[in-house]
Image (cartoon, rainbow, N blue to C red):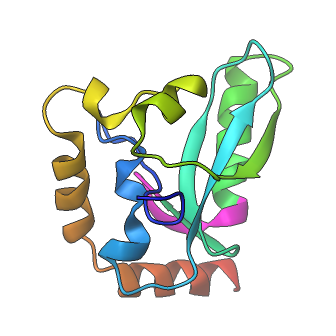
Amino acid sequence: MGAAGSHLLRLRGVPHSCGYLPQASPLKGFFAERIIPAENFSGNHVYVTNGAITFDHHGYSSRERLLQHHRKGWAAHSAGWHCTIEKVDFDLLDTAELNQRKMLGPDQYHYDAVLRARRFLQRIDHAEAAERALRIATA
């Protein structure tokens, strides 16, 4: 799977592999982005977005809200914390690619992380949740 097909997620060992959301849901136009903390800071995060709303292990929310929440949380934890946002241009199921970016690959978690990701995604009504998040984001 390429970068467009294998995106994100961490859910107690469900890694970025949940991010093959575009294949697992009827939603179109989602792509993976990555929050990259500045040198010597923790706080890496990968999620999928269409530019207005996002999806990660918390569910759907506005992109602005996710980024504010993430920045606020890490800045409270680590003075001077800051980050950049980049579109993911690598395969999020490729362990070597992930390890180069200081992330774990799906085979480095206990049990079958990809299966857990699929099960997690199947429990969600993506169309309804995304519509609710978009209504809130544009209110």
- Is residue 61 highlighted in magenta? yes
Q: Nearer the viewer, residue 32 or 82?
A: 32
Q: Nearer the viewer, residue 54 or 133?
A: 54
Q: Which residues are magenta?
A: 56-64
- For residue 123, say whether it is visible: no
* Picture quadrant of residue 94: top left
Q: Is residue 69 above or below residue 106?
A: below
Residue 108 position within the rendered picture, expressed as x and y whole percent measured from the top left: 29, 24
Residue 74 position within the rendered picture, expressed as x and y whole percent measured from the top left: 68, 28
Residue 61 position within the rendered picture, expressed as x and y whole percent measured from the top left: 55, 67
Identify the residue shown where x is 58% and y is 48%: 90
Identify the residue shown where x is 26% and y is 31%: 107
Q: Nearer the viewer, residue 96 or 39?
A: 96
Identify the residue shown where x is 30% and y is 41%: 14
Q: Is residue 30 above or below residue 107?
A: below
Identify the residue shown where x is 16% and y is 50%: 115
Decide if residue 66 is on the left or right side of residue 38. Answer: left
Decide if residue 88 is on the left or right side of residue 55. Answer: right
Q: Is residue 42 above or below residue 106?
A: above
